Image (cartoon, rainbow, N blue to C red):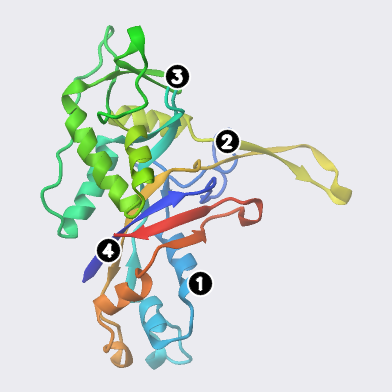
Amino acid sequence: MKMKTFTLKTRSGLHCGVGQGLSDIDLPTAKESVSGYPLVPGSSLKGVLRNIFDDGTDIFKAGFGQEGTNTQDDFASALSFSDARLLCLPVRSYFGTFAYLASSYSINILREMLLQNGKQDLPGLPTYPAPTKTDSYRVSLPETSKLKAFERLAQNVLLEDLDLLVDAASTNLADQWATLISEMLYADDEESRNLFIQHFAIVDDNVLAFLCETGLPVAAHNKIGENGVVVPGALWYEEFVPPEAIFIGSIYAEQGKGEINKQFTAENMLDFVCNKPIDCQVGGSATTGRGFVSINFN
């Protein structure tokens, strides 16, 4: 089995629904059950890519599977798609406008995928002391960061309602991870790489989990009845992932299944799907401009 990692960046608000919510939010977005981080389900990605690459060729059928008229013509997909898991969440910042906020947990997701794909000599993960009554949570920033405050607050970063203390000991780690991720996102665009590095930050896992729970945008909607009139009392709320969020995932491939598809190797499958970047729409609310994403294969 072969694999290739990919990054997914949201260009507009993204809502991958999970049905009806149990809280004040009627339509929450899909999240990991353990960490609470938002994700893009692999089934959603597979459906979108299947539609994009559906050219009727034998390699397409081998890659995405086929349901034939009899059991001999049926064969499963040779491609498997992981969920796209959160790497960086865009968060408002008092200085620098906003931050691409990662955590040790989200970076470790990327680190494990890269190690599985044969990448070596990766940076380590930052560790922070536990906060106290007189001390804040820490944040790691690259040397050229625009998120730092100034004058008497020069060692602080103000994100949403959080006041974080800059961890000077992990500046080098933040620089290394910012550079690596920026190269995955913008291989041929130096200006975009520099902008990403200037807005990148790593925080404690608890901080990012808190912001994933409280900091995602929520849109209010009214139900429209006959003749375009608002239905009284029919207000509902939809949660979504904001633009500029960055996710990481993997595509796995094996040799084509069935006698007719054994001619296609795992490398053939990956080359068929991962040969160039893809701009597409994922999730719901396509007609209102939601779900536009850019996928880059690494």
- Residue ID for mark 4: 4
* Percent coordinates x, y for residue 19 in the rendering: 55, 50
Q: Nearer the viewer, residue 150 or 163?
A: 150
Q: Nearer the viewer, residue 208 or 146?
A: 146
Distance in Å between CA atoms under marks 4 and 3: 38 Å
Say which mark, if any, is on residue 28. Answer: none
Residue under the image location 42 percent in, 30 percent down: 211
- Are circles 1 and 2 on residues that touch, CB within 8 Å? no
Q: Is 13 on the left or on the right of 85, as rendered?
A: right
- Residue ID for mark 3: 161
* Percent coordinates x, y for residue 265 in the rendering: 25, 81
The kind of residue tagged 4 is Lys
Q: N-terminal of the two: label 1 or label 2?
A: 1
Residue 291 in the image: above or below residue 167: below
- Residue ID for mark 1: 51
Q: Residues within 10 Å of mark 4 (few under 14, many from 20)?
A: some
- Residue ID for mark 2: 218
Label 2 residue SS: strand
Q: N-terminal of the two: label 1 or label 3?
A: 1
Residue under the image location 40 percent in, 79 percent down: 65
The kind of residue tagged 2 is Val
Q: Residues within 10 Å of mark 2 (few under 14, many from 20)?
A: some
Q: Quadrant of the N terminus?
A: bottom left
Distance in Å between CA atoms under marks 1 and 2: 29 Å
